[in-house]
Image (spheres, rainbow, N blue to C red):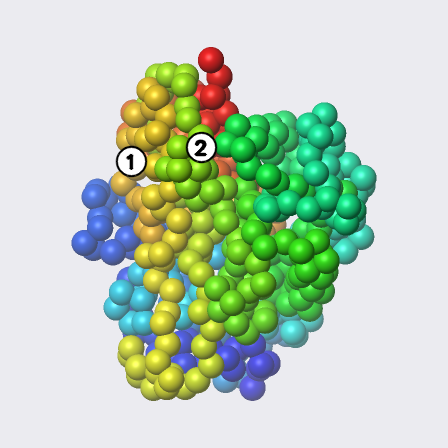
Amino acid sequence: MSGSALAKVEYDFSHCQRCSTCKWVHLWEVKSHRFSRSCPSVVYGKFDCYTAQGRNDIAFGLYNNELSWEESKDTLLDVIYKCTLCAACDINCKRVMDLDIIGVLDALREEACEQGYGPLPAHKEFITSIMQYDNVWKQPRTRRANWARDLKVKDLSKGKEKSDVLYYVGCTYAYRPGQDVIPIGMAKLMRQAGVDFGILGAKEVCCGGIADNVGDKKSFEEIARKNLDMFKESGVKKIVTNCPGCFTAFSEKYARMLKTDTKNLDYEVVHATVYLDQLIKEGKLKFSKDLNLKVTWHDPCHLGRRGEPYKHWEGKRIQWGLTDPPRELPRGLNGIYEPPRNILKAIPGVELVEMERIKEYSWCCGSGAGARSAFPDFALSTAKDRIDEALSTGASTLVTCCPWCETNLSDAVNSLGSKLKIMNIVELATQALEK
Protein backbone atom coordinates (compact mmCIF):
# COMPACT_ATOMS: atom_id res chain seq x y z
CA MET A 1 0.00 0.00 0.00
CA SER A 2 1.23 3.48 -0.85
CA GLY A 3 2.00 6.37 1.49
CA SER A 4 0.06 8.40 4.04
CA ALA A 5 -0.91 11.21 1.64
CA LEU A 6 -3.35 9.03 -0.29
CA ALA A 7 -4.73 7.44 2.87
CA LYS A 8 -6.23 10.81 3.82
CA VAL A 9 -8.39 10.91 0.68
CA GLU A 10 -9.14 7.18 0.21
CA TYR A 11 -12.90 7.75 0.50
CA ASP A 12 -12.85 10.38 -2.25
CA PHE A 13 -10.86 8.58 -4.93
CA SER A 14 -12.60 5.25 -4.27
CA HIS A 15 -16.14 6.65 -4.59
CA CYS A 16 -15.79 8.26 -8.03
CA GLN A 17 -18.74 7.19 -10.23
CA ARG A 18 -17.02 8.15 -13.52
CA CYS A 19 -19.92 10.42 -14.43
CA SER A 20 -17.66 12.85 -16.39
CA THR A 21 -19.11 15.88 -14.59
CA CYS A 22 -15.52 16.90 -13.85
CA LYS A 23 -14.89 17.58 -17.56
CA TRP A 24 -17.66 20.07 -18.27
CA VAL A 25 -19.20 23.27 -16.99
CA HIS A 26 -22.33 22.21 -15.13
CA LEU A 27 -25.16 21.68 -17.61
CA TRP A 28 -27.31 24.39 -16.07
CA GLU A 29 -24.49 26.90 -16.59
CA VAL A 30 -23.47 26.06 -20.18
CA LYS A 31 -23.96 28.95 -22.63
CA SER A 32 -22.52 27.34 -25.78
CA HIS A 33 -20.74 24.20 -26.93
CA ARG A 34 -17.62 26.20 -27.80
CA PHE A 35 -17.02 27.24 -24.20
CA SER A 36 -18.55 24.31 -22.33
CA ARG A 37 -15.38 22.53 -21.18
CA SER A 38 -14.06 23.05 -17.66
CA CYS A 39 -10.82 21.01 -17.47
CA PRO A 40 -7.79 22.40 -19.33
CA SER A 41 -5.78 19.25 -18.63
CA VAL A 42 -7.99 16.84 -20.59
CA VAL A 43 -8.59 19.34 -23.39
CA TYR A 44 -4.83 19.38 -23.94
CA GLY A 45 -3.97 15.81 -22.90
CA LYS A 46 -6.99 14.18 -24.67
CA PHE A 47 -6.93 10.92 -22.72
CA ASP A 48 -9.17 10.23 -19.74
CA CYS A 49 -6.22 9.84 -17.37
CA TYR A 50 -5.91 13.64 -17.51
CA THR A 51 -9.37 14.13 -16.01
CA ALA A 52 -10.23 14.11 -12.34
CA GLN A 53 -11.90 10.73 -12.69
CA GLY A 54 -8.77 9.38 -14.39
CA ARG A 55 -6.59 10.71 -11.60
CA ASN A 56 -8.96 9.14 -9.06
CA ASP A 57 -8.26 5.81 -10.78
CA ILE A 58 -4.52 6.49 -10.58
CA ALA A 59 -4.79 7.28 -6.85
CA PHE A 60 -6.77 4.06 -6.36
CA GLY A 61 -4.19 2.06 -8.31
CA LEU A 62 -1.24 3.47 -6.39
CA TYR A 63 -2.95 3.07 -3.04
CA ASN A 64 -3.84 -0.58 -3.71
CA ASN A 65 -0.54 -1.52 -5.44
CA GLU A 66 -2.22 -1.97 -8.82
CA LEU A 67 0.10 0.69 -10.24
CA SER A 68 3.85 0.87 -9.69
CA TRP A 69 5.98 4.00 -9.53
CA GLU A 70 8.99 2.02 -10.69
CA GLU A 71 7.24 0.77 -13.84
CA SER A 72 5.29 3.93 -14.75
CA LYS A 73 7.20 6.86 -13.21
CA ASP A 74 7.38 9.14 -16.25
CA THR A 75 3.75 8.62 -17.25
CA LEU A 76 2.51 9.08 -13.69
CA LEU A 77 4.48 12.30 -13.19
CA ASP A 78 3.22 13.69 -16.50
CA VAL A 79 -0.41 13.01 -15.62
CA ILE A 80 -0.13 14.15 -12.00
CA TYR A 81 1.66 17.43 -12.73
CA LYS A 82 0.09 18.40 -16.08
CA CYS A 83 -2.71 20.07 -14.17
CA THR A 84 -3.14 23.64 -12.94
CA LEU A 85 -5.01 22.63 -9.76
CA CYS A 86 -7.65 25.15 -10.86
CA ALA A 87 -10.35 23.14 -8.99
CA ALA A 88 -12.96 23.40 -11.76
CA CYS A 89 -13.37 19.61 -11.55
CA ASP A 90 -13.72 19.85 -7.77
CA ILE A 91 -16.53 22.43 -7.97
CA ASN A 92 -18.48 20.43 -10.52
CA CYS A 93 -18.06 17.14 -8.65
CA LYS A 94 -19.42 18.70 -5.48
CA ARG A 95 -22.66 19.48 -7.30
CA VAL A 96 -23.30 15.77 -7.82
CA MET A 97 -21.05 13.60 -5.59
CA ASP A 98 -19.61 15.78 -2.79
CA LEU A 99 -16.11 14.38 -3.31
CA ASP A 100 -13.00 16.34 -2.32
CA ILE A 101 -11.31 16.13 -5.72
CA ILE A 102 -8.81 18.92 -5.11
CA GLY A 103 -7.74 16.94 -2.03
CA VAL A 104 -7.01 13.92 -4.24
CA LEU A 105 -5.02 15.98 -6.76
CA ASP A 106 -3.03 17.54 -3.94
CA ALA A 107 -2.43 14.14 -2.31
CA LEU A 108 -1.11 12.66 -5.56
CA ARG A 109 1.60 15.32 -5.66
CA GLU A 110 2.40 14.84 -2.00
CA GLU A 111 2.59 11.09 -2.68
CA ALA A 112 5.03 11.68 -5.55
CA CYS A 113 7.26 13.67 -3.21
CA GLU A 114 6.94 11.13 -0.38
CA GLN A 115 8.11 8.40 -2.75
CA GLY A 116 11.05 10.52 -3.96
CA TYR A 117 9.82 11.08 -7.51
CA GLY A 118 8.47 14.62 -7.22
CA PRO A 119 8.45 17.46 -7.66
CA LEU A 120 9.57 18.00 -11.26
CA PRO A 121 12.98 19.61 -11.98
CA ALA A 122 11.38 22.95 -12.97
CA HIS A 123 9.58 23.04 -9.64
CA LYS A 124 12.67 22.11 -7.65
CA GLU A 125 14.40 25.12 -9.19
CA PHE A 126 11.73 27.44 -7.78
CA ILE A 127 11.87 25.86 -4.34
CA THR A 128 15.68 25.97 -4.23
CA SER A 129 15.51 29.65 -5.12
CA ILE A 130 13.06 30.33 -2.29
CA MET A 131 15.29 28.55 0.21
CA GLN A 132 18.39 30.44 -0.92
CA TYR A 133 16.98 33.87 -1.78
CA ASP A 134 13.50 34.01 -0.18
CA ASN A 135 12.01 34.48 -3.66
CA VAL A 136 11.29 32.32 -6.71
CA TRP A 137 13.36 34.40 -9.15
CA LYS A 138 16.91 33.91 -7.78
CA GLN A 139 17.15 37.61 -7.04
CA PRO A 140 19.04 39.29 -4.19
CA ARG A 141 16.94 40.00 -1.11
CA THR A 142 18.20 43.58 -1.18
CA ARG A 143 16.27 44.24 -4.40
CA ARG A 144 12.89 43.16 -3.05
CA ALA A 145 11.77 46.64 -2.03
CA ASN A 146 13.37 48.55 -4.91
CA TRP A 147 9.91 49.43 -6.25
CA ALA A 148 9.33 51.53 -3.09
CA ARG A 149 12.67 53.32 -2.84
CA ASP A 150 11.25 56.66 -4.01
CA LEU A 151 7.92 56.38 -2.17
CA LYS A 152 9.02 56.67 1.46
CA VAL A 153 6.92 53.70 2.58
CA LYS A 154 7.17 52.50 6.20
CA ASP A 155 9.37 49.44 6.68
CA LEU A 156 7.72 47.42 9.45
CA SER A 157 10.51 44.84 9.57
CA LYS A 158 12.86 47.28 11.31
CA GLY A 159 10.70 47.43 14.44
CA LYS A 160 10.83 51.23 14.64
CA GLU A 161 7.58 51.93 12.78
CA LYS A 162 4.09 50.55 13.22
CA SER A 163 1.16 50.52 10.84
CA ASP A 164 -2.47 49.46 10.64
CA VAL A 165 -1.92 47.50 7.43
CA LEU A 166 0.89 45.35 6.06
CA TYR A 167 1.07 45.53 2.30
CA TYR A 168 2.61 42.25 1.15
CA VAL A 169 3.90 42.62 -2.41
CA GLY A 170 4.98 39.09 -3.33
CA CYS A 171 7.91 37.80 -5.41
CA THR A 172 6.65 38.43 -8.92
CA TYR A 173 5.38 41.97 -8.50
CA ALA A 174 8.55 42.86 -6.60
CA TYR A 175 11.06 41.38 -9.05
CA ARG A 176 9.70 40.79 -12.54
CA PRO A 177 10.62 43.61 -14.98
CA GLY A 178 7.70 45.90 -15.70
CA GLN A 179 5.43 44.49 -13.00
CA ASP A 180 6.52 46.92 -10.29
CA VAL A 181 3.82 49.26 -11.65
CA ILE A 182 1.34 47.20 -9.62
CA PRO A 183 2.81 47.76 -6.12
CA ILE A 184 3.57 51.37 -7.05
CA GLY A 185 -0.03 51.80 -8.20
CA MET A 186 -1.42 50.05 -5.12
CA ALA A 187 0.63 52.31 -2.87
CA LYS A 188 -0.75 55.33 -4.72
CA LEU A 189 -4.34 54.11 -4.34
CA MET A 190 -3.96 53.43 -0.62
CA ARG A 191 -2.34 56.80 -0.01
CA GLN A 192 -5.11 58.50 -1.96
CA ALA A 193 -7.58 56.80 0.42
CA GLY A 194 -5.61 57.83 3.51
CA VAL A 195 -4.54 54.31 4.50
CA ASP A 196 -1.72 53.93 7.02
CA PHE A 197 0.31 51.03 5.63
CA GLY A 198 3.80 49.60 5.65
CA ILE A 199 5.85 46.83 4.02
CA LEU A 200 8.41 44.27 5.16
CA GLY A 201 11.01 45.68 2.79
CA ALA A 202 13.97 43.46 1.97
CA LYS A 203 12.87 41.01 4.68
CA GLU A 204 9.66 40.03 2.90
CA VAL A 205 9.68 36.27 2.24
CA CYS A 206 7.96 34.26 -0.49
CA CYS A 207 4.57 32.93 0.63
CA GLY A 208 5.67 29.38 -0.26
CA GLY A 209 2.47 28.54 -2.11
CA ILE A 210 4.32 26.98 -5.04
CA ALA A 211 5.99 24.44 -2.72
CA ASP A 212 2.61 23.38 -1.38
CA ASN A 213 1.12 23.24 -4.89
CA VAL A 214 3.75 20.81 -6.15
CA GLY A 215 3.53 18.56 -3.09
CA ASP A 216 6.70 19.54 -1.22
CA LYS A 217 4.98 19.91 2.14
CA LYS A 218 8.22 19.94 4.14
CA SER A 219 9.60 22.98 2.31
CA PHE A 220 6.21 24.67 2.40
CA GLU A 221 5.96 24.34 6.16
CA GLU A 222 9.47 25.73 6.64
CA ILE A 223 8.63 28.77 4.52
CA ALA A 224 5.24 29.24 6.18
CA ARG A 225 6.73 29.14 9.68
CA LYS A 226 9.24 31.79 8.66
CA ASN A 227 6.45 34.06 7.49
CA LEU A 228 4.30 33.42 10.53
CA ASP A 229 7.21 34.38 12.78
CA MET A 230 7.72 37.55 10.75
CA PHE A 231 4.05 38.50 11.00
CA LYS A 232 4.12 37.95 14.75
CA GLU A 233 7.28 39.99 15.28
CA SER A 234 5.92 42.93 13.30
CA GLY A 235 2.60 42.87 15.15
CA VAL A 236 0.65 42.63 11.91
CA LYS A 237 -3.12 42.19 12.18
CA LYS A 238 -4.21 42.94 8.61
CA ILE A 239 -2.35 41.86 5.46
CA VAL A 240 -3.27 43.21 2.03
CA THR A 241 -1.84 41.43 -0.99
CA ASN A 242 -2.31 41.71 -4.76
CA CYS A 243 -1.32 38.19 -5.82
CA PRO A 244 -4.16 35.64 -5.48
CA GLY A 245 -1.56 32.92 -4.89
CA CYS A 246 -0.17 34.79 -1.88
CA PHE A 247 -3.71 35.48 -0.67
CA THR A 248 -4.64 31.79 -0.79
CA ALA A 249 -1.37 30.75 0.83
CA PHE A 250 -1.77 33.09 3.80
CA SER A 251 -5.48 32.40 4.30
CA GLU A 252 -6.21 28.82 3.20
CA LYS A 253 -2.87 27.01 3.11
CA TYR A 254 -1.46 28.37 6.38
CA ALA A 255 -4.75 27.65 8.18
CA ARG A 256 -4.76 24.10 6.80
CA MET A 257 -1.17 23.59 7.96
CA LEU A 258 -2.05 24.89 11.45
CA LYS A 259 -5.26 22.80 11.50
CA THR A 260 -7.49 25.76 12.24
CA ASP A 261 -10.08 27.89 10.47
CA THR A 262 -8.94 30.89 8.44
CA LYS A 263 -10.99 33.11 10.75
CA ASN A 264 -8.92 31.90 13.74
CA LEU A 265 -5.54 32.99 12.34
CA ASP A 266 -3.70 35.72 14.26
CA TYR A 267 -4.06 38.04 11.28
CA GLU A 268 -6.65 38.91 8.65
CA VAL A 269 -5.74 38.49 4.98
CA VAL A 270 -7.50 40.82 2.54
CA HIS A 271 -7.08 40.66 -1.20
CA ALA A 272 -6.42 44.02 -2.86
CA THR A 273 -9.70 43.92 -4.82
CA VAL A 274 -11.70 43.43 -1.62
CA TYR A 275 -9.78 46.23 0.09
CA LEU A 276 -10.16 48.68 -2.79
CA ASP A 277 -13.87 47.86 -3.11
CA GLN A 278 -14.26 48.63 0.60
CA LEU A 279 -12.43 51.95 0.25
CA ILE A 280 -14.66 52.90 -2.68
CA LYS A 281 -17.84 52.05 -0.75
CA GLU A 282 -16.62 54.11 2.23
CA GLY A 283 -16.09 57.09 -0.05
CA LYS A 284 -12.33 57.15 0.63
CA LEU A 285 -11.37 56.35 -2.96
CA LYS A 286 -12.95 58.14 -5.89
CA PHE A 287 -12.17 57.98 -9.60
CA SER A 288 -12.28 61.08 -11.78
CA LYS A 289 -10.99 60.11 -15.23
CA ASP A 290 -13.31 58.66 -17.90
CA LEU A 291 -11.43 55.74 -19.47
CA ASN A 292 -13.90 54.90 -22.27
CA LEU A 293 -13.11 51.16 -22.30
CA LYS A 294 -15.04 47.97 -22.94
CA VAL A 295 -13.48 45.34 -20.70
CA THR A 296 -14.00 41.74 -19.66
CA TRP A 297 -12.91 40.28 -16.33
CA HIS A 298 -10.91 37.08 -15.87
CA ASP A 299 -11.44 35.39 -12.49
CA PRO A 300 -8.09 34.00 -11.25
CA CYS A 301 -8.60 30.51 -9.82
CA HIS A 302 -6.93 31.31 -6.49
CA LEU A 303 -9.13 34.36 -6.04
CA GLY A 304 -12.37 32.69 -7.08
CA ARG A 305 -12.89 28.95 -6.72
CA ARG A 306 -9.89 28.53 -4.45
CA GLY A 307 -10.29 31.81 -2.59
CA GLU A 308 -12.74 30.57 0.01
CA PRO A 309 -11.81 30.70 3.71
CA TYR A 310 -10.57 27.37 5.06
CA LYS A 311 -12.70 25.51 7.61
CA HIS A 312 -10.80 22.78 9.39
CA TRP A 313 -12.40 19.38 9.77
CA GLU A 314 -11.29 16.03 11.12
CA GLY A 315 -13.65 13.10 11.18
CA LYS A 316 -15.20 10.26 9.23
CA ARG A 317 -16.78 10.25 5.77
CA ILE A 318 -19.95 8.15 5.92
CA GLN A 319 -21.63 8.49 2.54
CA TRP A 320 -22.66 11.18 0.06
CA GLY A 321 -23.20 14.42 1.94
CA LEU A 322 -22.83 12.86 5.39
CA THR A 323 -19.85 13.13 7.72
CA ASP A 324 -19.22 12.67 11.41
CA PRO A 325 -18.91 15.36 12.68
CA PRO A 326 -20.70 17.47 10.02
CA ARG A 327 -18.33 19.03 7.50
CA GLU A 328 -18.81 22.14 5.40
CA LEU A 329 -17.01 21.63 2.09
CA PRO A 330 -15.73 24.51 -0.06
CA ARG A 331 -17.87 24.71 -3.18
CA GLY A 332 -16.40 27.76 -4.88
CA LEU A 333 -19.47 29.84 -4.12
CA ASN A 334 -17.76 32.03 -1.52
CA GLY A 335 -14.76 33.03 -3.59
CA ILE A 336 -13.96 36.66 -4.37
CA TYR A 337 -16.11 37.46 -7.40
CA GLU A 338 -18.02 40.70 -6.86
CA PRO A 339 -15.35 43.08 -5.46
CA PRO A 340 -13.29 43.30 -8.70
CA ARG A 341 -16.48 43.70 -10.72
CA ASN A 342 -17.62 46.45 -8.34
CA ILE A 343 -14.32 48.27 -8.89
CA LEU A 344 -14.67 48.10 -12.66
CA LYS A 345 -18.24 49.39 -12.47
CA ALA A 346 -17.08 52.29 -10.27
CA ILE A 347 -14.57 53.54 -12.85
CA PRO A 348 -16.08 56.17 -15.18
CA GLY A 349 -16.39 55.08 -18.80
CA VAL A 350 -15.68 51.38 -18.18
CA GLU A 351 -18.20 48.94 -19.65
CA LEU A 352 -17.94 45.40 -18.29
CA VAL A 353 -18.95 42.57 -20.62
CA GLU A 354 -18.76 39.04 -19.26
CA MET A 355 -17.31 35.92 -20.82
CA GLU A 356 -19.39 32.72 -20.81
CA ARG A 357 -17.32 30.90 -18.19
CA ILE A 358 -17.11 33.13 -15.14
CA LYS A 359 -16.88 33.01 -11.36
CA GLU A 360 -16.81 29.40 -10.07
CA TYR A 361 -16.98 28.15 -13.68
CA SER A 362 -14.19 30.36 -14.97
CA TRP A 363 -11.67 28.84 -17.40
CA CYS A 364 -8.14 28.77 -15.97
CA CYS A 365 -5.37 30.86 -17.56
CA GLY A 366 -3.23 27.70 -17.72
CA SER A 367 -0.33 28.91 -15.61
CA GLY A 368 -1.01 27.70 -12.08
CA ALA A 369 0.51 25.06 -9.80
CA GLY A 370 3.77 24.85 -11.74
CA ALA A 371 2.11 24.10 -15.10
CA ARG A 372 3.71 27.02 -16.93
CA SER A 373 7.23 26.23 -15.72
CA ALA A 374 7.05 22.48 -16.41
CA PHE A 375 4.70 22.37 -19.41
CA PRO A 376 4.82 25.71 -21.28
CA ASP A 377 3.00 24.35 -24.36
CA PHE A 378 0.11 23.17 -22.21
CA ALA A 379 -0.04 26.50 -20.39
CA LEU A 380 0.00 28.49 -23.64
CA SER A 381 -2.68 26.33 -25.27
CA THR A 382 -4.96 26.83 -22.27
CA ALA A 383 -4.40 30.60 -22.31
CA LYS A 384 -5.25 30.79 -26.01
CA ASP A 385 -8.62 29.25 -25.27
CA ARG A 386 -9.29 31.97 -22.71
CA ILE A 387 -8.23 34.70 -25.14
CA ASP A 388 -10.64 33.34 -27.74
CA GLU A 389 -13.40 33.54 -25.14
CA ALA A 390 -12.45 37.10 -24.21
CA LEU A 391 -12.41 38.18 -27.86
CA SER A 392 -15.90 36.74 -28.35
CA THR A 393 -17.27 39.39 -25.96
CA GLY A 394 -16.12 42.27 -28.14
CA ALA A 395 -14.01 43.72 -25.32
CA SER A 396 -10.81 45.56 -26.16
CA THR A 397 -9.22 44.84 -22.79
CA LEU A 398 -9.04 41.78 -20.54
CA VAL A 399 -8.60 42.78 -16.91
CA THR A 400 -7.37 40.50 -14.14
CA CYS A 401 -5.30 40.71 -10.93
CA CYS A 402 -2.85 37.81 -10.95
CA PRO A 403 0.75 38.12 -12.15
CA TRP A 404 0.75 34.55 -13.49
CA CYS A 405 -2.53 35.09 -15.34
CA GLU A 406 -1.27 38.37 -16.76
CA THR A 407 1.96 36.83 -18.06
CA ASN A 408 0.43 33.70 -19.53
CA LEU A 409 -2.51 35.48 -21.13
CA SER A 410 -0.17 38.12 -22.57
CA ASP A 411 1.94 35.36 -24.14
CA ALA A 412 -1.23 33.92 -25.69
CA VAL A 413 -2.22 37.31 -27.10
CA ASN A 414 1.22 37.69 -28.67
CA SER A 415 1.13 34.15 -30.03
CA LEU A 416 -2.27 34.74 -31.64
CA GLY A 417 -1.28 38.15 -32.99
CA SER A 418 -4.31 39.64 -31.24
CA LYS A 419 -4.78 43.31 -30.36
CA LEU A 420 -6.53 42.45 -27.08
CA LYS A 421 -4.91 44.33 -24.21
CA ILE A 422 -4.16 42.62 -20.87
CA MET A 423 -4.31 44.87 -17.81
CA ASN A 424 -4.15 44.51 -14.06
CA ILE A 425 -7.12 46.04 -12.24
CA VAL A 426 -4.77 48.11 -10.07
CA GLU A 427 -3.20 49.62 -13.18
CA LEU A 428 -6.67 50.47 -14.51
CA ALA A 429 -7.79 51.99 -11.21
CA THR A 430 -4.60 54.07 -10.99
CA GLN A 431 -5.24 55.48 -14.46
CA ALA A 432 -8.75 56.48 -13.37
CA LEU A 433 -7.28 58.65 -10.58
CA GLU A 434 -5.55 60.90 -13.07
CA LYS A 435 -7.04 64.28 -13.86
Which one is in front, 203 or 410?
A: 203
Q: CA distance from mark 2 to mark 1?
A: 28 Å
Asked whether the residues under the numbered discs 2 and 1 touch, taking CB atoms below 8 Å apart as contact, a structural biologist would say no
Q: Amino acid at mark 2?
A: Lys
Q: Classify residue 62 as left or right of residue 283.
A: right
Q: Residue at x 55, y 46 (%)?
A: 240
Is residue 257 shown above or below 159? below
Q: Which mark is residue 354?
A: 1
For mark 2, does the 10 Å Cα neighbourhood hold few (<14), some (14 to 19), or many (20 or more) residues?
some
Mark 1 residue element: loop
2 or 1: tag closer to the N-terminus: 2
Name above or below for residue 433 compared with residue 215.
above
Question: In the rendered view, does 17 fall on the left or right side of 85?
Answer: left
**In the image, 29: left or right of 207?**
left
- The kind of residue on which mark 1 rests is Glu
Crowd class of label 1 (few under 14; some 14 to 19; many from 20; radius 10 Å): some
Quadrant in which the N terminus appears = bottom right
Say which residue label 2 marks.
Answer: 284
Is residue 269 among what the camera can see? Answer: yes
